[in-house]
Image (cartoon, helix red, strand yellow):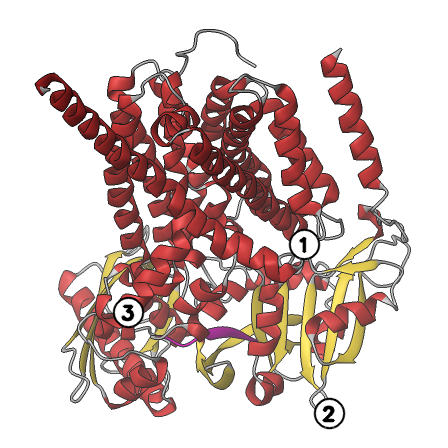
Amino acid sequence: MKNLTALFISLLFLLSVSGCNVQDFEQPSIENYGMVGVMGFDVAEDGYMNVTVTLPQPEMDAETKVQKYTTTVKSPHRAIMEASTKSEKLLSTAQLRVILFSEEFAKEVGVWEVLENLYRDPRVGTNSFIAVVKGSTEELLSGEYKDKPNINRYLNQLLKPTTITAFSPFTTIHHFIRHVTSQVSDALAPYIEKTGDSIQITKVALFKGSKMVSTIEREEAKIIESIKRNRKTSDISYEIQEDGRGSGEEAVLVLNFIRSKRDVKTNGDPVNPEIHVYLYIAGSVVDYTGDYNLDVEGERHILEDKLSKEIEAKLSDSIQQFQELGIDPLALGDYFRMKDRGEWSKEYWNDIFSRAEITVHVEPRITSTGTIY
Amino acid sequence: MDTGKFKKLNKYHVIFLVHCSLSGIALFSLPYYLRHVGYNMWMVLLIYGVLSSLLLKVILQLSKQFPNDTFYVIMEKVVGKYVSKLLHVFILSYAIVQVSNIGKSYVRIVQSVTLPDFTITFPALTLFLVMISIVNGGIKSIARFCILSFFLTVWMGYYSNWAFSDANVHHLYPRLHEYHMIDWLNGLFEGSQIMLGFVLIVFFYPYIIDQKKAFKHAAIGIWSGIGIMILICIASIVYFSIWQIEHLLYPLLNLFQAVELSNVERIETMGISLYAFLVLSKASLYLWVAKKGLDALFSKHKNRTRHLFIVNGISVLLVLGPIPLIYQTFLYEKWVIYWGYAVILLPLFLLIINHWKKRKKGNDGKEASAS
């Protein structure tokens, strides 16, 4: 009886409390939501931004594969609110996969404010990819890619790291924010452009703080990724000048990397900083158009030496470019910081990095030539 | 309520009761609480482990002197009827505030991440109703629920694998010189809410079967809890930048967001749902302490189920009631920690008084026999 009384009192309490919850609008069901897959940001006038959002087209008989809305607003979530007023769906960021910035936006406005606000929203997954677009993101998202899936899936798959494109896999919101706010490194992001009926990752954008400052080639970015951590990297292609070949007749060597290992040594002296980078890579030959006989160990070593010099030269050029720009996408500061007891900040490190004497030593090893010599 | 034998807690019950009395919902925000010392946060946890083990050793000295009495009865025996009543109210209020603090923190996370379009009323009521059901079964029921909670949630630690696969291990290198004493004290203070719970052993000590090994079992509970917390902290250290650690309110959710599975998306939603078990086990323990407090105050320690409903009702009101935010902030972020310190120090205080009383009694006895 006592238990029944307690249950009755609990139910009464429950019912009375439910009266506090005012339901003045209908709670939407899952079918009523429009899941935004891609957001693109372009520069507009007077501090505004043009935001283009795309979401899957739920109507089978509609002419386009995706719904697309463009609004001129001051913050990313305002764009969702504004676009919701044009759509029959309630737009949500819960399935946001890709965030695009036009080159102009990334260079002039910077991406921090947008990313910080998206990072704040718990509905936005921190695994959403970001990329910089040549030209306008609205144009890219309006393009027709006839033999491709809808733009949401296409971009998501394109930016997902694979063995071929994994030159800069860490360009999710989380990774970008980690590098931008890191005291020892700077961020990279894929640079994409529309080429005919496709979208192609053509370069890698370099950032100083939250603003894009320059680009590097994909092959350089692959080596940079190898220096950042011991990992399996993607296939890499180099053109090698061989003896007896004229200028412009370089042999092409494509290696499928099995593993890479790096070692960084620093003197920890902020006045006369010295950094020595060692990179050991091992891979198997996939393509080779040169004249060396890979069957012969001696000739294989000659090819390895030439590849080593080629990579070292390109890497040294990249590092020099980074020093001139005052950025460290290689995250070498981690090693220096372990030996330095100064008051550490990003500015402090960038200053040291730009003055540092940096040497590079690359040791490639051809472990296999495939099923033929 | 379990009306079986009075001594009912075996070693596993003790281990998991102490384990679950520690972190609870605070696991979600642990790296944020310890942000003041940056990447050195794992050292703070080691300090907590050592401090709580030492305090536990001393606290159990009091319980050993009163092996069959709950802490409320010990207070009455040591400081007398009237002062003990005041102390009962003090502990009762602390336990109720802790229950609301844990419940409120959890429903806030649920509301902001899982159910952003809903008010917190229904999730809060559901949580507190389940709590009644657990506590109504007595301390053994809570202990069993703690064991269940542990095994239902501990496997989520596997998902830290994703954070480690993208780790920057250089972050683990100690940078002690970058932080001042005040930073360490702030970190120790703010993070201490994750360690205050172990003192609750003084309330369930009389129910322990093997009291001689209570310290050993409780210490296992403490260090297993510390181990899990260190794992979370290390995952956060290697995965986040300092800025992220300083600004992310629920870093554990972001760690879960790193997980990519082919068949499940947004694993953090599942994590939040599963962590309800940890929240319920810790809150139930505090609710049980509060209910025992009311029993001590109004029914001479006799079990009264209505007291459970009363303390639970007050906790619900604290969560759903119209308390201004400024008071809530003070209550849940500052006062409750100072309150917790006082509750931890109380057994030490009672131990000293009891020792002094015994000594006095001994002296009086000697004087009487001499005269």
Q: Residues within 10 Å of mark 3 (few under 14, many from 20)?
A: few
Q: Nearer the viewer, mark 1 or mark 2?
A: 1
What's under tag 2, amino acid-wise? Glu
Asked where in the image residue A288 lies, by quadrant, the reply is bottom left
Which residue is at 15% across, 61% downward?
A: A297
> Mark 3 falls within which chain?
B
Q: CA distance from mark 1 to mark 2?
A: 45 Å
| Position in image of residue B98 (x %, y %) | 52, 42
* Residues behind callouts 1 and 2 on a single chain: no
Which residue is at 56% across, 17% downward?
A: B303
Give the camera-side residue of B11 and A367: B11
Q: Nearer the viewer, mark 2 or mark 3?
A: 3
Q: Residues within 10 Å of mark 2 (few under 14, many from 20)?
A: few
Give the camera-side residue of A193 and A187: A187
Tell me the tag on residue A45: 2
The residue singled out by tag 3 in the image is: B179
* Residue A250 located left or right of residue A210: left
Tell me the tag on residue B68: none
> Mark 2 falls within which chain?
A
What's under tag 1, amino acid-wise? Ile
Q: Secondary structure at mark 2?
A: loop
What's under tag 3, amino acid-wise? Tyr
The residue singled out by tag 1 in the image is: B323
Q: What's drawn in magenta, residue-wise? A: A185-192
Q: Is residue A89 above or below residue B256?
A: below
| Position in image of residue A193 (x %, y %) | 61, 77
Asked where in the image residue B326 lies, by quadrant, the reply is bottom right
* Residue A109 located left or right of residue B347: right
> Mark 1 falls within which chain?
B
| Position in image of residue A306 (x %, y %) | 22, 75
